[in-house]
Every structure is written in C-alpha cells, then in structure tokens.
Image: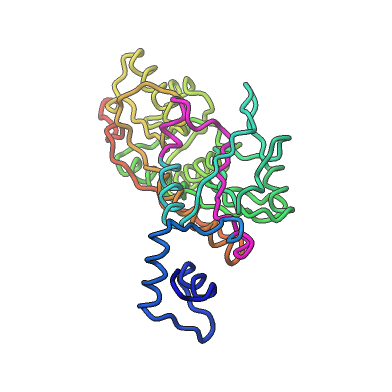
Amino acid sequence: MAGVSQTTVSLVLNGRAEGEVRISPETRDRVLQVIRETGYVADPAARRLVERRNRIYGVFTYEAVFPAESADFYHPFLVGIEECAEEAGCDLLLFTSAKVEQGERRRIFSAESRIRLADGCVLLGRTIDRDDLSRLLSEGIPFVSVGRRDDAGGPVPYVGADYPPAVRALVKRAAALGHRRMAYVGTGQGAESYADRLRGFTEGVAATGVEGVHLEQADGVFGSGATVVFAEELADGAAIAEIARTRGLDVPRDLSIVALGARTRPVSTDIDFSGFRIPRREMGRRAVELLTQVLEHGGVPQELLACELVEGSTLAPVHDER
C-alpha cells in the first residue's frame, strides 16, 4: 500500500536506520500514513523474538499493597513505578498468584509462580525472603529490590533510602536543642531498613556525645530519663504520644518525639511528627530505571536516595523544669 519494501516498513516502525539505509521524510510519512489508515499494530510475538524482551516488567510484593491498612505506605512506590514504566514504553504485571496467608508471606517461587513471564521484576516489601533473593541471583533472573538488601549469595541490586545520615542529622538537631538523654524505640533488626535506622541513631549519639538507650517497647520510655524518643515506626510514635497524654505529659513540652519514616501499620493520629520523608515515589521510579539498566547492560546497581528532613511539631528544646 505504501509502495515500499518490508524492510523499509520495519525500519520506520522501529524508528531507526540500518547500515547505509536512509529513509527520506517523504517515505517515512507515507508509511506512517498507511499505518494510521489501516490501524496496523506490530505483532508483539514477532517483536518479542527480535528484541528477546516482552517489554513487560513484573512487580512482586511480599505484603498485600491494596488493602486500606497498607495503601498509604505502598501507594507512592507504585505511582513512581507506573510513571517510569509508562515513560519506558513497558507494561506492568503485578504478581498476585502467590496468596498471602494469615501469619505468612508471599514467596516468589511458589507452585503458582509466573515470575519468568516478565523481562525482569521489581520487588517490594519491608522484608524480602533471603532464599528468594539467592535463587533469583543463582538463576540469573533480572530484578531490582526497592529497599537496601544485604548480600544473599552475592550482591543484590537495589534502590533504597539512605536512613543513617537522616537519623544522625535528627540526633544532632535534638542535641542542639539541649537533649542529653535520648531513647530509640524499635527492634533495630530484621529488616535492613530497621538496622540502618538504629545504626544512624547509634552513630549520631556517639558523634554528639549524648546518652542513648535502645528500647524495644514503647512503655519503656517512661522512667528511662529520656527527653526525646526516636520511634522506629510512626505507629510507635503515636502510641508513645498517647501514653504520655494519659500520664499528663505534654508533647513536645515534656517529651519530644521523632518519627523515623512513614506509617507502615494502621494508626489513627493527626500529630505532625518531626522526622524525615522517605523518597518513596522517587525510589519506585529509580527501581524501574535500574531494572532497565540491568536488562540492557547487566551489572548489580546499588543506590541509596537521601531522605528529606521534616520539621514537624514534636521536637522542641528541653524545658527548663524537666
């Protein structure tokens, strides 16, 4: 219909030239006009054979991301992933066949696993199974984790939040406000993000010369002598604020609270916590960019993105009457 060869049509469709072949603007316009008139769409199976890619990126989540209690935390990651995938001309495949059973977590390599349908996969989850990571690495399945991950039989490609500098900066800010005994509330272990937060707190305390105590339970704060609390989870910060209220204490006049990140558990609070913002949307976008890099060039990229400090209203100078 366009009066040109199949090769010319192919070059126009793929937006490129081959060898010494140069296509004039008039010829290109004629081919594109016929494509528009006929509604022609390239055969995806044929294109897949040529490119050796489906242009489908998988997204695997270890926790359910759409129920209301987790939507607030995961939504920005998904927004960033979708935005970047659209820009890259790729479709997204959300792996949901591995069901989330009560008290258990999804596993990538379940009996229903379809992980290989995608060119590669973005992994989401506060903690990711180490055996899954090891198998992905050993079988050469391209992936990028959202969140820093320790080695799992080899280095793991990831994009994460750089928690230690943010926590150190907050400890320094608290010290400048006169706080000399600080408490960290949370496990500080398990997920790499928790370990990174505690490491930042420990380093910050050492650098400023103040006292620091690690408590796993919120109720241990009272009686510890701490004038500022660094809550690993926002929900812990809300719980501490509520306990303080029942004890007749004012936040931040009598007790300052710093929340180290966004809410990951259901919590009802309108408190404007001091702390930092996790670059969730940016992490989602960068995960897709790095996955594209892995697919096209290989390698094991590892990047940490800076957290933005948030002033909030729960960190104040030490009150004179304390």
Q: Nearer the viewer, residue 192 or 223?
A: 192
The answer to which quarter of the image holds residue 98 is top right
| Number of numbered discs visible in the structure rendering | 0
In the rendered image, residue 64 lying in the magenta stretch gets the answer: yes
Q: Position of residue 187 (x, y in %)?
A: 56, 32
Q: Nearer the viewer, residue 152 or 52?
A: 52
Q: Is residue 308 above or below residue 236?
A: below
| Image colouring | rainbow
Q: Residue at coordinates 29% horizontally, 31% vertically from top-left?
A: 272
Q: Assign the C terminus to one quadrant of the image.
A: top left
Q: Nearer the viewer, residue 6 or 126?
A: 6
Q: Assign the N terminus to one quadrant of the image.
A: bottom left
Looking at the image, the residue that sits furthest to the bottom is 20
The answer to which quarter of the image holds residue 176 is top left
In the rendered image, residue 108 lying in the magenta stretch gets the answer: no
Q: Position of residue 145 (x, y in %)?
A: 57, 48
Q: Is residue 61 above or below residue 40?
A: above
Q: Nearer the viewer, residue 144 or 126?
A: 144
- Would you say 215 lies left or right of 172 here? right
Q: Residue at coordinates 61% horizontally, 49% vertically from top-left?
A: 118
Q: Is residue 35 above or below residue 212?
A: below
Q: Position of residue 175 (x, y in %)?
A: 35, 42
Q: Which residues are magenta?
A: 48-75
Q: Position of residue 284 (x, y in %)?
A: 46, 48
